[in-house]
Image (spheres, rainbow, N blue to C red):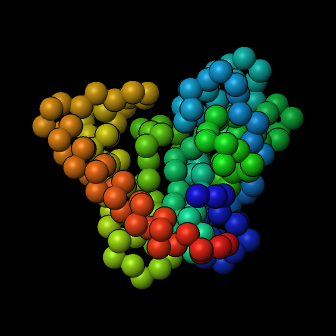
Amino acid sequence: MKTADANQIYVMEFCSSICAHSAPMIVECSPAHGTAENECFELVGRKVQELGGSQVFGWAVWEKPGVFIEAEFHSVWQQPNGMYLDINPRNPIFNIKTNIVRSGQENKIQRKTNRQYSQSLVNDNDVIRFLYLSAKRFQILNRGKRAYEHGEVSLPNKEIKEYQRAMKELIKLQNIINNRYSTVTA
């Protein structure tokens, strides 16, 4: 996975499908050390309380080059000087830059597990199934009252089995996709 190239037409079209009135912008990353990975909403909220500025909601846009593109509900810090900064710790491969499409919405029910928006860039049933299961995983983790929770999620036994089945197939498909498209470059 890598940051999607905001200059590519397919990326611009994908972003427009999420938020019609907002173009993607590149945001520098400077992760806050010693904080939980992918808890951007709380992290940015604390930074605003501590140092001022504002919390900006939108979508971080990632892609597996040539295979699929996805958008994750995300939050960045607009510093008091007006500059944007992504302070969310992530896997080091993501910590170069973030593409964000501003949404203007302040609905924080989407969580770190989100693959809310995704699009296959290839005609491949395994990729399509992978994206479907990613969305299903999100739906399981956000059912009912869990939609308003953040951090670690507890599932009832019935849903644990459903989640485990989805994850088992997701992992299998991820390995197939990684092997099939290991030579695809941006």
Residue at (32, 67) in percent of width and height: 129
State the residue at coordinates (55%, 69%): 182
Residue at the limit of the structure toward the right, as seen here: 81
Image coords of residue 174 (percent x, y)? 41, 60
The quarter holding residue 49 reads top right
Residue that protrudes farthest toward the front in the picture:
179
Q: Is residue 70 visible?
A: yes
* Residue 45 horizontal side relative to residue 165, left or right: right
| Vertical relation: 124 (above or below) 53 | below
Q: Residue 74 at what x, y percent from top left?
A: 57, 44
* Quadrant housing the N terminus: bottom right
Q: Quadrant of residue 56?
A: top right
Question: Horizontally, is 18 left or right of 53 in the view?
Answer: left
* Residue most extreme to the left: 158
**Residue drawn 43% across the image and 27% down it:** 151
Q: Position of residue 19 (x, y in %)?
A: 56, 61
